[in-house]
Image (cartoon, rainbow, N blue to C red):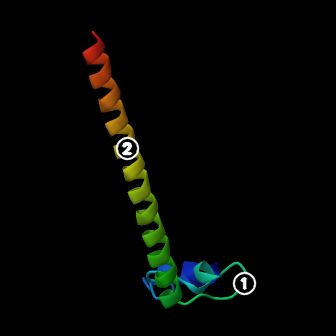
Amino acid sequence: MSYVRDCVYNGVTTFIPIGTCEMMNVGEAGIIISNEELGEQLAETKSDFQDRVGKLESVVDDLVNTLDTLMEKMGANE
């Protein structure tokens, strides 16, 4: 803490990690993960999320179509 205090006092900002630092990149097994690996994991997560959203949109579309059909049948019965 004294090192950081001295840096701040002297206007030195080289101690500030830009973007990330090693301790933020430690995986479950305590292994340091590279930025490239983090990027790959993020891309996989994004792809999985997009797949799930696509499936959810499909289910919602099916529900809307079913509701429209039911509404039409109810209107025809009046």
Residue 16 seen in this snapshot:
no
Q: Nearer the viewer, residue 39 or 51?
A: 51
Q: Quadrant of residue 34?
A: bottom right
Most extreme residue toward the front, as rendered? Answer: 77
- Helix or strand or loop: what does disc 2 sit on? helix
> What residue appears at the point 31 percent right and 31 percent down from the top-left corner?
69
> What residue appears at the point 34 percent right and 45 percent down from the top-left corner?
61
The quadrant in which the C terminus is found is top left
Q: Which mark is residue 30?
A: 1
Q: Nearer the viewer, residue 7 or 45?
A: 45
Q: Is residue 50 above or below residue 32?
A: above
**Residue 49 horizontal/vertical position (percent):** 46, 64
Q: Which mark is residue 69?
A: none
Q: Which mark is residue 62?
A: 2
For disc 1, the neighbor class at 10 Å (few under 14, some 14 to 19, many from 20) is few
Q: Quadrant of residue 24?
A: bottom right
Report the side of 57 relative to 27 (left or right): left
Number of marks: 2
Q: Nearer the viewer, residue 20 or 49?
A: 49
**Residue 8 horizontal/vertical position (percent):** 49, 79
Name the residue type under label 2: Asp
- Helix or strand or loop: what does disc 1 sit on? loop
Q: CA distance from mark 2 to mark 1?
A: 45 Å
Q: Is residue 58 above or below residue 3?
A: above
Report the side of 63 relative to 22 (left or right): left
- Pick whichever of labels 2 and 1 is earlier in the sequence: 1
Foreground disc of the pair 2, 1: 2
